[in-house]
Amino acid sequence: MAGGTSNPDYGSWQNWVVAFLTLAVVTALNHFGKGILKLASILIGILVGYVVSIPFGMVNLSSVGEAKVFQLPQFMHFGIHFEISACVAIGLLFAINSVQAIGDYSATTIGAMDRVPEDRELQNGIMAYGVTNILGALLGGLPTATYSQNVGIVTTTKVINRWVLGLAAAILGVAGIVPKFSALLTTIPQCVLGGATVSVFASIAMTGMKLVASAEMDYRNSSIVGLAAAIGVGVSQASAALASFPDWVTTIFGKSPVVLATLIAVVLNIILPKSRDEKKHEKELKKEVKEKIQQDHEEFEQE
């Protein structure tokens, strides 16, 4: 909201005015608007903030004039070369990002549909995540990951229609082959984006709290959640905490709190003893799963 730490005018009053005006528009439309005004609150807020930022000289359109009108991606531009060390590193990162993706899928489903996603839905999401990265690599694109900010947008708007998401994907596709359009998007000031998305981050945080609160917060679960969050966020915020370790350690564990927090939570969940109620519930769940598998097997044989 202050304009981005890399900008020379970071923290100026102009940035704060534009950011708070954008936030005010988004918040007002979310709570008082109806229909399309409420659904498009973030987009309208960005448009209002963009227009207001022009008199302050925050918009530079020179990159739009220099960009090409149309350009297709080059298939196999970099060729294919398999290096063992790179494959292992990227494979590990994709496995870790899959954990983050599962969290994003779960938060999206809970925030938009008030239910926990099914295993089949999570599997399809991970599969789609892998396929899109394969296609992107063939077209010269960088590896992608799920964007947690979109969780807040979906939670805020409650829009999960496939046609809407398909249209959003088409817009991104147009931005990829029309450089002028993508260059225009990059001219949006950071204070405008900050003001529009701060409510999104708030929705993400509350969705996460809702997901955590869905489990019984006894001493064991509180210890797991608290230690995982504290160590994960703490290490990611202290940039020099892993300075003496190899670069791959910093890349995997120091860039995002998700990886380290997930690892700690999984280890603690295995090590810490469970209560009698949890053990009983786990036994009942295993029994239900076993009966369901047996039932499906019998139905398959009958067919």
Image (tube, rainbow, N blue to C red):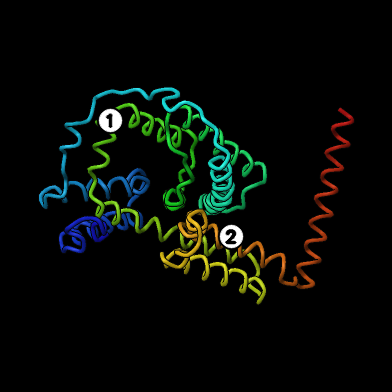
* Residue density around tag 1, few if under 14, some if 14–19, many if 20 or more, within 10 Å: many
**Secondary structure under the numbered disc 1 in the rendered image:** helix
Which residue is disc 1 drawn over? 179
- Relative side of 96 to 274, left or right: left
Q: Residue furthest bottom?
A: 219
Q: Position of residue 158 (x, y in %)?
A: 46, 48
Query: Which mark is first along the chain, 2 or 1?
Result: 1
Circles 1 and 2: CB distance less than 8 Å?
Answer: no
Image: 245 above or below 273: above
Q: Is residue 175 visible?
A: yes
Circle 1: residue type: Pro
Q: Residue at x 83, y 38 (%)?
A: 296
Q: Position of residue 1 (x, y in %)?
A: 27, 59
Q: Is residue 106 visible?
A: no
- Relative side of 197 to 69, left or right: right
Nearer to the camera, 191 or 107: 191
Give the alpha-carbon distance from disc 1 to disc 2, as whole Å: 38 Å
Which residue is disc 2 drawn over? 262
Q: Position of residue 47 (x, y in %)?
A: 24, 45
Circle 2: residue type: Thr
Nearer to the camera, 25 or 147: 147
Quadrant for the C terminus, please. Answer: top right
* Residue density around tag 2, few if under 14, some if 14–19, many if 20 or more, within 10 Å: some
**Secondary structure under the numbered disc 2 in the rendered image:** helix
